[in-house]
Each structure stands twice: as structure tokens, then as C-alpha cells.
């Protein structure tokens, strides 16, 4: 499909738009400033763990809810993917998810979704006209949402803030390029150069933006966060009892999607290596718990089947538990019950699972890539290992599981690190300050792009002594 990247949606080839009727009510408190968050494939109201529901969904919803508590009126827009899903989900009096019709109302893989983005723009504008709302600032998430934001920027005077969540320039270094790759890479460059501000979630992501995408544009570093009221220190014995784990077990947990880029194969092979080097009397105490759901007939179900076959082939089936999709309310039990949480991703822009686990006091072993180098403090909150290094991950797991005194220190330090630096309230406060500054600067007609050097926001965080 040949599509002009930047331009009015009317100039684009798009499927015939459906007529949409929205059950909406006008806002009763006009003093609140309305803003829009856009997450075209990551539904903020979706159950975490199903296809395409992961860190981005959590980020958008938690940021939206926290911004509402800080005084904003927040509308979060996503694509409707199920016929029986509600069009509007009200999370709080001033925060809601709005599901727009854009293409078929069923799951569409991300690499096939861009063709429906012109219709997404049209549906959003129709909703806005019917609701009578005005969004002077729009925060987009992922490159297709950023493309939508650029279209909106052409037809209205908005301040456009963008968070990438992942970069094609990094993804395509290790994977074959799909047909959409050229479009994505070009869009990511245009977003960086033309958005009002790009929010990088770590200094490492900022470096990648500058070295791999463009030297232009304005970037601030504001990390992701976690709910420190939900993810917190709990008695490990209580968590293990609730989940049926034995008190003497050595528990390794993985939390995330079934996706080859998440590196589950590396973890499974490393666990098998650890199992094979463990004394026979202790082999039964080792347990690998893989937390994450999948959709029958979709790519994540195929990946789960592949991992299950590998587990059987390596002889660790009796020591491996596939927990399936776990609700956000029970997820802290898995982190707390674990002796270590392993994140073997090939790349992570930030690493939300890492801070959730650390908030629960669980040491983290993660790939030494992307934002994980920012969230995990080596030897203080966990360990970093080269991606796809089976021997390295096995050695790191052995260190955490056998050095009990060191692991106990890490548990305390990890919790403190997250509470001081990564609460959703703190993250939303930084975003709120950025939004207000951008809106003021727009009124003063002082665009921030005139700065000689882009500001980076906060300096890299350091663990307090």
C-alpha cells in the first residue's frame, strides 16, 4: 500500500469508514483542561496478558488515571477490537477509555494495522465533534499513534507529545524486515523531528533516538512507573502459600508476553543448564514459573507451544509451571513468591516488569539492553547479562539463588529504589509539568525547538546510599 506518511487523512487511501454513534456526555467541570492520550493498539482498558496487552497498556492507563488525579480531564483513545467491548470505559470521574472504529472489530497484528490509521483519525475527529471537546495537547504512544498525532497536528493547533515504547531501528537489527518496515522507520523519524516533544523513558532510549533515528527534535527523559501501593513488600511465605509453592523451593519467575523477542527460549535453556548442574537431591526444589496469556490461533499461542515443546525436550517439564494469564491484582503474589525475576528480552525501551518485581523486593536478572540498563542497578537491585547469553543467565540465577545474604540486601535496596524513583504519581507529576510548560509556551509563541541542545529532563537516576 502506497501511503503518504504526513498529510491530511482525506488524502490517504483508507477503508470505507463506518458510521459511529457514541453514547457520550459533556463534561460537567469546564475548569479541567482536557487532554488526549492515544494508544492505537494498546487498549488501556484491556485485560493485561492477552494478545497485544502488556506494558504499553499499563503505562497509558496508569498515567491517564494519575493525570486525572492531578486535575486533568483525560480521554484515552484506542482501536475497538471486539464487537462486545464497550465503546466507552469510565475509569474514574475524569478519566475514560474511548474505543474507536477503525477497520474490522477483531484483533489485527500490529504489522497489518497501519492501513486502518486514516480511519482511526476520522473516527477520533468525529467523536471530538460530537462530544464537543477540545484537546490542545495530545500524547501519543507507539509509532502508529504518533502518525495519527501528526495528522491531527496538521488540522488543529495541538501540542504533540510522543512516547515510542519500541523503535523499529532497533527491532529490525535482529529481525527480518516486514513490508511495513520502511513506513515505520520513516514515520518514527518524522515524529521525532516534528512532534512538540518526545518523551524517552530512559537515557539509553534517548541515546538510541539520537544515534539511530534523528539528531533533530526535542527530547525529555521521564521514566515509566509502577503502582507502589499494589507492588510492594509482602511476606514471601504468605505469597507462596496462596500460590501453592513450597517454602523450600527455589522459584524463578518470568512475566510477559509469548514473543520471540522476549527471550523466553534463553531463559528456558539457562534454567535447564542450572538444573543440570544442581545436585540431584536439590533438583526437585527448582521451579520455573512462566506468567503470561495467549490467544488461540494467534502468534503468541504458537510461541507458547514452541516453548512448551522446548521445556519437554530439555527435560524440565516437571519443574516448569505455565501460569497463564494472571490478573494485575494477583501478579504481586508471583513476584513476591519468586526468589528472582528474569527478563531475558532482546530489547526493552524501559522494562516495566523489572520495576514491578523490584517494588515487591524481588531481585531482577535482566538483559543488558535498552532501558533495563537504567531500571536495574547491577549488584544493588539485581544483575545484568548480555542478551541471549544462556551461560550468563544460568550463572546469574545460581548467584541469586545460592547467595542468600546478598539476595536479602538486594530485596531491600530494590524496593527503596522503586519507591523513590518510579511511582506512577511521580511520573505523572513530571508529565503534568511538561504538559503545562508546553501549553504555556504555545500561548507565548516560544517553541522549544529553537534550543541549541535538546533538554534531557532528569539526569540519570542513582540509587541513594
Image (cartoon, grey):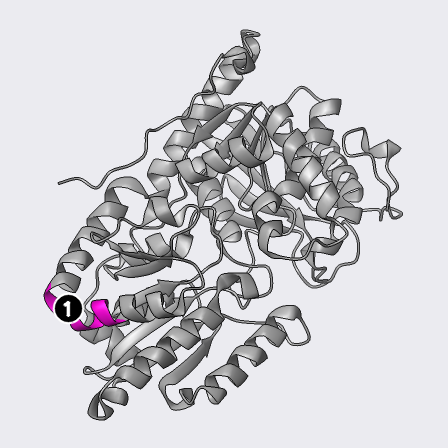
Q: Is residue 436 above or below residue 54?
A: above
Q: Quadrant of the C terminus?
A: top left
Count of number-bearing discs: 1
Residue at which label 1 appears: 403
The location of residue 213, given as percent across then percent down, is: 59, 34
- Magenta stretch, main secondary structure, is helix
Residue 400 painted magenta: yes
Q: Is residue 47 above or below residue 16?
A: below
Left-right relation of 113 to 166? right
Q: Is residue 29 visible?
A: no
Of 323 and 213, the residue lying toward us: 213
Q: Which residues are magenta?
A: 398-405
Rate crowding at label 1 as few (under 14), some (14 to 19) or many (20 or more) other CA atoms within 10 Å: few
Residue at 35% across, 79% down: 273
Residue furthest bottom in the image: 281
Q: Is residue 327 visible?
A: yes
Left-right relation of 269 to 44? left
Residue at 80% across, 48% down: 115
Left-right relation of 349 to 13? left
The location of residue 2, given as percent across then percent down, is: 86, 42
Of 158 and 396, the residue lying toward us: 396
Q: Is residue 357 above or below residue 425?
A: below
The location of residue 12, given as percent across then percent down, is: 86, 37
Residue at 39% across, 30% down: 430
Residue 291 painted magenta: no
Left-right relation of 316 to 32? left
Of 231 and 396, the residue lying toward us: 396
Question: Residue 7 sits in which quadrant?
Answer: top right
The location of residue 328, given as percent across then percent down, is: 42, 62
Amino acid at each position: 500500500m502506497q501511503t503518504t506518511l504526513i498529510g491530511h487523512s482525506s488524502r490517504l487511501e483508507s477503508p470505507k469508514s463506518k458510521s459511529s454513534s457514541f453514547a457520550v456526555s459533556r463534561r460537567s467541570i469546564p475548569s479541567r483542561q482536557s487532554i488526549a492520550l492515544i494508544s492505537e493498539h494498546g487498549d488501556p482498558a484491556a485485560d493485561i496478558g492477552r494478545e497485544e496487552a502488556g506494558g504499553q497498556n499499563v503505562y497509558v492507563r496508569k498515567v491517564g488515571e494519575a493525570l486525572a488525579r492531578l486535575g486533568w480531564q483525560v480521554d484515552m483513545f484506542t482501536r475497538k477490537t471486539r464487537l462486545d467491548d464497550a465503546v466507552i470505559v469510565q475509569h474514574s470521574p475524569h478519566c475514560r477509555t474511548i474505543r474507536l472504529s477503525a477497520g474490522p472489530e477483531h484483533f489485527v497484528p500490529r504489522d497489518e494495522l497501519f492501513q486502518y490509521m486514516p480511519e482511526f483519525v476520522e473516527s477520533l475527529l468525529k467523536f471530538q465533534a460530537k462530544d464537543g471537546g477540545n484537546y490542545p495537547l495530545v500524547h501519543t504512544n507507539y509509532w502508529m499513534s504518533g502518525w495519527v498525532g501528526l495528522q491531527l497536528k496538521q488540522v488543529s493547533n495541538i501540542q504533540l507529545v510522543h512516547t515510542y515504547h519500541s523503535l523499529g531501528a532497533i527491532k529490525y537489527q535482529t529481525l527480518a524486515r516486514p513490508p511495513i518496515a520502511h513506513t515505520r522507520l520513516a514515520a518514527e523519524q518524522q515524529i521525532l523531528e516534528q512532534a512538540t516533544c518526545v518523551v524517552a523513558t530512559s537515557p539509553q532510549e534517548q541515546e538510541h533516538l539520537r544515534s539511530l533515528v534523528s539528531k533533530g527534535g526535542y527530547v525529555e527523559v521521564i521514566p515509566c512507573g509502577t503502582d507502589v501501593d499494589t507492588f510492594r513488600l509482602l511476606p514471601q511465605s504468605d505469597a507462596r502459600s496462596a500460590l501453592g509453592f513450597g517454602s523450600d523451593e527455589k522459584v524463578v519467575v518470568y512475566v510477559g508476553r509469548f514473543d520471540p523477542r522476549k527471550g523466553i527460549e534463553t531463559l528456558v535453556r539457562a534454567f535447564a543448564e542450572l538444573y543440570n548442574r544442581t545436585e540431584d537431591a536439590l533438583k526437585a526444589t527448582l521451579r520455573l514459573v512462566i506468567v503470561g496469556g495467549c490467544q488461540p490461533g494467534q502468534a503468541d499461542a504458537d510461541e507458547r507451544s514452541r516453548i512448551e515443546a522446548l521445556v519437554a525436550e530439555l527435560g524440565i517439564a516437571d519443574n516448569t509451571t505455565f501460569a497463564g494469564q494472571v490478573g494485575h491484582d494477583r501478579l504481586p503474589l508471583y513476584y513476591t513468591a519468586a526468589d528472582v525475576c528474569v527478563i531475558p528480552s532482546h530489547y526493552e525501551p524501559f522494562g516495566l516488569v523489572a520495576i514491578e518485581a523490584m517494588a515487591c523486593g524481588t531481585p531482577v536478572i535482566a538483559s543488558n539492553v535498552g532501558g533495563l540498563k537504567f531500571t536495574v542497578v547491577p549488584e544493588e537491585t539485581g544483575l545484568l547479562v548480555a542478551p541471549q547469553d544462556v551461560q550468563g543467565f544460568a550463572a546469574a540465577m545460581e548467584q541469586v539463588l545460592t547467595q542468600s545474604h546478598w539476595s536479602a540486601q538486594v530485596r531491600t535496596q530494590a524496593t527503596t529504589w522503586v519507591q523513590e524513583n518510579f511511582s506512577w504519581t511521580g511520573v505523572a507529576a513530571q508529565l503534568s509539568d511538561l504538559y503545562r510548560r508546553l501549553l504555556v509556551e504555545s500561548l507565548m509563541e516560544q517553541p522549544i525547538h529553537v534550543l541549541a541542545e535538546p533538554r534531557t529532563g532528569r539526569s540519570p537516576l542513582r540509587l541513594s546510599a
